Image (tube, helix red, strand yellow):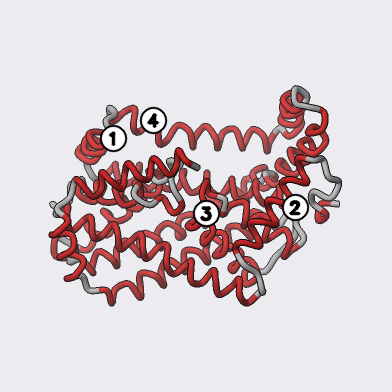
């Protein structure tokens, strides 16, 4: 938690000291915020497609209607924006387990798969754009900002996700081998943990079972495309707020640039940071926009753009998530405390770890 907070503080300071704050404030004051309405609508639509994808990932456990999963997804994203260490993923898996009676550990595995699919989809977008747009300048600019050679920077943001996807696929295709490997690791731990962790490993592998079906895997990748195109739509609409449609030669160039900025911002924000990746998101988004080869965007304008995009991604989800919690007479604190109590019971080897898995 403290490492993540430290990373956010460092990047927030970098964001502030490497921009003309007066001009950024002027850019924020001159922005046309009416475009935030369609921007937020596009983002909420992307979360609907996320819900559909999650439904596909969980249908082998229990069919759940999208209208029941959508509030759980919103609450999970709300928690990710407010809690450290991406605890929103744990909150989401616990919430759906209590609400729908599915395995919480298997649900957590499906969320883990989601994250890897997201990263691979974004890397695919970058690769496709790189075929048509020279991105050497973008790589060099980000390399200078992060202080790493660009090949190493590219490897740092791509190899882990590709490796994780390969590991997940192997675990799904060869569950017996994965179970044996997990048993070897668990067998070295204190005896009081072994039974609970063995059960958790089994449930986690159950959550990976959709990856064994090529048709399901193809559908998951297909559903991932509109998720990120719609989120890119938020970036695109906020661009109109800051007059980027006049900065770029055409709306097509602006659209391509915003898809690329969306990919770089989200992959870059996967680094552990404070809740909502505050500071880190703004810095990476601004530098990615400034480095775009299709236009020359002022850094102060790009800074204001990055701040507003982040606000548009966070604030509506937090408000809507709170509404959904109130409707169920719940609170984020209650969900978090319940999850912590369950974790404590798990460590103690409680037989009631996950009643829904009986």
Q: Is residue 248 at least partly visible in the picture? A: no
Alpha carbons under labels 2 and 1: distance apart: 40 Å
Give 13 or 254, whichever is nearer the viewer: 13
Nearer-N-terminus badge (2/3)? 3
Q: Compared to 297, does 331 lie above or below?
A: below
Residue to which mark 4 is pinned: 155
Q: Measured from the top left, where is residue 218 in percent x and y?
A: 56, 49
Q: Residue at x 35, y 69 (%)?
A: 39
Residue pointed to by mark 1: 146
Q: Nearer the viewer, mark 4 or mark 1?
A: 1
Local crowd size for mark 1, using a 10 Å CA cut-off: few (<14), some (14–19), many (≥20): few
* Residue ID at (66%, 62%): 334
- Which residue is pictured at 24% across the width and 46% down the height? 287
> What residue is shown with label 3?
83
- Cα–Cα gap, marks 3 and 4: 29 Å
Mark 2 and mark 1 in contact? Answer it, CB < 8 Å. no
The residue where tag 2 is placed is: 103
Mark 3 or 1: in front is 3
Does label 2 or label 1 sit earlier along the sequence?
A: 2
Where residue 184 sits, quadrant-wise, is top right
Mark 4: which secondary structure?
helix
């Amino acid at each position: 938690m403290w490492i993540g907070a430290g990373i956010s503080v460092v990047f927030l300071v970098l964001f502030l000291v490497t921009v003309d704050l007066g001009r950024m404030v002027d850019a924020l004051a001159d922005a046309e915020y009416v475009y935030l309405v369609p921007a937020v609508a596009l983002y909420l639509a992307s979360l609907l497609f996320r819900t559909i994808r999650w439904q596909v990932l969980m249908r082998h456990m229990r069919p759940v209607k999208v209208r029941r999963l959508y509030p759980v997804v919103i609450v999970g994203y709300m928690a990710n924006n407010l809690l450290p260490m991406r605890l929103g993923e744990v909150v989401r898996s616990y919430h759906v387990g209590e609400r729908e009676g599915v395995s919480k550990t298997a649900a957590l595995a499906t969320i883990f798969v989601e994250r890897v699919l997201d990263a691979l989809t974004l890397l695919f977008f970058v690769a496709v754009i790189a075929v048509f747009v020279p991105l050497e300048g973008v790589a060099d600019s980000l390399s200078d900002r992060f202080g790493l050679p660009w090949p190493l920077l590219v490897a740092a943001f791509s190899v882990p996700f590709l490796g994780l996807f390969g590991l997940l696929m192997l675990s799904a295709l060869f569950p017996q081998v994965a179970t044996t490997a997990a048993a070897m690791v668990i067998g070295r731990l204190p005896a009081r943990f072994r039974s609970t962790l063995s059960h958790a490993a089994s449930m986690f592998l159950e959550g990976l079972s959709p990856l064994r079906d090529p048709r399901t895997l193809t559908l998951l990748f297909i559903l991932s495309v509109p998720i990120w195109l719609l989120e890119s739509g938020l970036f695109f609409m906020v661009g109109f707020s800051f007059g980027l449609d006049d900065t770029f030669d055409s709306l097509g160039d602006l659209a391509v640039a915003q898809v690329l900025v969306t990919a770089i911002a989200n992959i870059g924000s996967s680094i552990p940071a404070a809740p909502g990746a505050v500071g880190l998101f703004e810095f990476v988004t601004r530098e990615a926009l400034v480095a775009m080869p299709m236009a020359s965007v002022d850094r102060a304008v790009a800074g204001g753009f990055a701040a507003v995009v982040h606000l548009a991604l966070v604030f509506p989800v937090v408000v809507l998530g709170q509404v959904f919690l109130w409707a169920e007479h719940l609170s984020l604190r209650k969900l978090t405390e319940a999850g912590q109590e369950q974790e404590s019971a798990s460590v103690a080897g409680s037989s009631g770890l996950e009643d829904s898995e009986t």
